[in-house]
Amino acid sequence: MLSEIVCRCEAANCSRKLTDGSCMLVFRTEAGERRAYECDCGHVTVTVAAPDE
């Protein structure tokens, strides 16, 4: 089920799919992982995921 979740750009009128190739920064801490994606439209989307337990 989680494998079906797609990361998409959140800019107005965009909604492009964000892939590993558009991931510009990964930051990991004990609290989880943050990823910054830069879309072709220039917008940056940040995702947050809790650590696997």
Image (tube, rainbow, N blue to C red):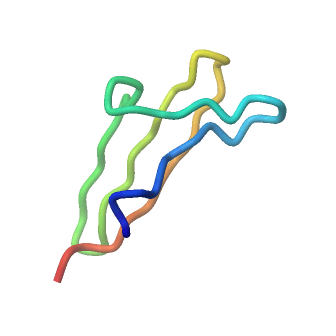
Tell me if residue 33 comes above or below residue 9 in the rendering. below
Q: Position of residue 33 (x, y in %)?
A: 31, 59
Quadrant for residue 20, please give it. Answer: top left
Tell me if residue 1 comes above or below residue 5 in the rendering. below
What residue is shown at x 34% (from left), y 36% (from top)? 25
Relative depth, front residue between 14 and 44: 14
Q: Position of residue 49 (x, y in %)?
A: 37, 66
What residue is shown at x 61% (from left), y 30% (from top)? 16
What residue is shown at x 20% (from left), y 75% (from top)? 52
Compared across the picture, whether 26 is left or right of 19 comes to: left
Relative depth, front residue between 34 and 6: 6
Quadrant for residue 2, please give it. Answer: bottom left
Q: Residue pushed farthest left? A: 53
Compared across the picture, whether 37 is left or right of 13 comes to: left
Relative depth, front residue between 17 and 25: 17
Q: Position of residue 18 (x, y in %)?
A: 48, 34
Task: Give the position of the N terminus as an image quadrant.
Answer: bottom left
Task: Give the position of the C terminus as an image quadrant.
Answer: bottom left
Relative depth, front residue between 3 and 27: 3
Q: Residue pushed farthest bottom? A: 53
Q: Position of residue 14 (x, y in %)?
A: 74, 29
What residue is shown at x 39% (from left), y 46% (from top)? 35
Compared across the picture, whether 13 is left or right of 2 comes to: right
